[in-house]
Amino acid sequence: MDVQLKRGILDVCVLAAIRSVDSYGYQIIKDLKPYVELSESTLYTILKRLEASELLTVRTAEHGGRLRKYYHITAKGLQYIEEFKQEWKGIMSIYRFIAGEEESHG
C-alpha cells in the first residue's frame, strides 16, 4: 500500500478512536487492534503529528499514581474525519471500477 495513503488512513483511524471519548495510548492501540495493528512507536508518532496539526489536544492526568496523557479530538479533527469520508467515497468508486464491479459509462 502507498505510504502516504496508509499514513492518512492511520491518522483517521486514531482520530476515530478518540472521536467519542478521550483516550490514552495503550487504550487507543487496544481499540484499533480489531482493525489495524499499530506499534507504540508508530502510534506516538501519529499522535505527535496530529497534535502539531491541531487535530487533537493532549492533557496529562494522574492515574494509579502515574501521569497519563489523554488525547482529545478537536473540531478541526472531527472535520478531518468528515473530509476523509467524502474523499473515501471517490476512492471506493475507483476501486469498484478497477475490481470490475461497476459498469463502464461509455
Image (tube, rainbow, N blue to C red):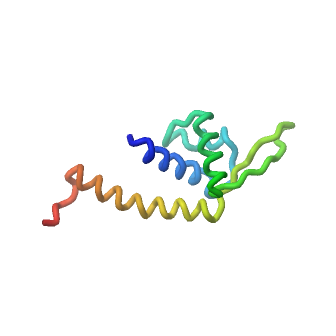
**Above or below, 105 relative to 52:** below
The quadrant of the rendering that contains the C terminus is: bottom left
Residue at the image position 69 percent from the left and 50 percent from the top: 71
Front position in the image: 79 or 32: 79
**Above or below, 39 relative to 49:** above
Residue at the image position 64 percent from the left and 40 percent from the top: 44
Image label count? 0
The answer to whether residue 102 is left or right of residue 1 is left
The quadrant of the rendering that contains the N terminus is: top left
Q: Position of residue 8 (x, y in %)?
A: 49, 50
Q: Position of residue 28 (x, y in %)?
A: 62, 43
The answer to whether residue 101 is left or right of residue 46 is left
The answer to whether residue 2 is left or right of residue 9 is left
**Residue found at the very far left of the displayed protein:** 106
**Residue found at the very far right of the displayed protein:** 65
Q: Position of residue 35 (x, y in %)?
A: 49, 42
Front position in the image: 51 or 25: 51
Residue at the image position 73 percent from the left and 48 percent from the top: 70
**Above or below, 53 relative to 28:** below
Q: Position of residue 79 (x, y in %)?
A: 56, 65
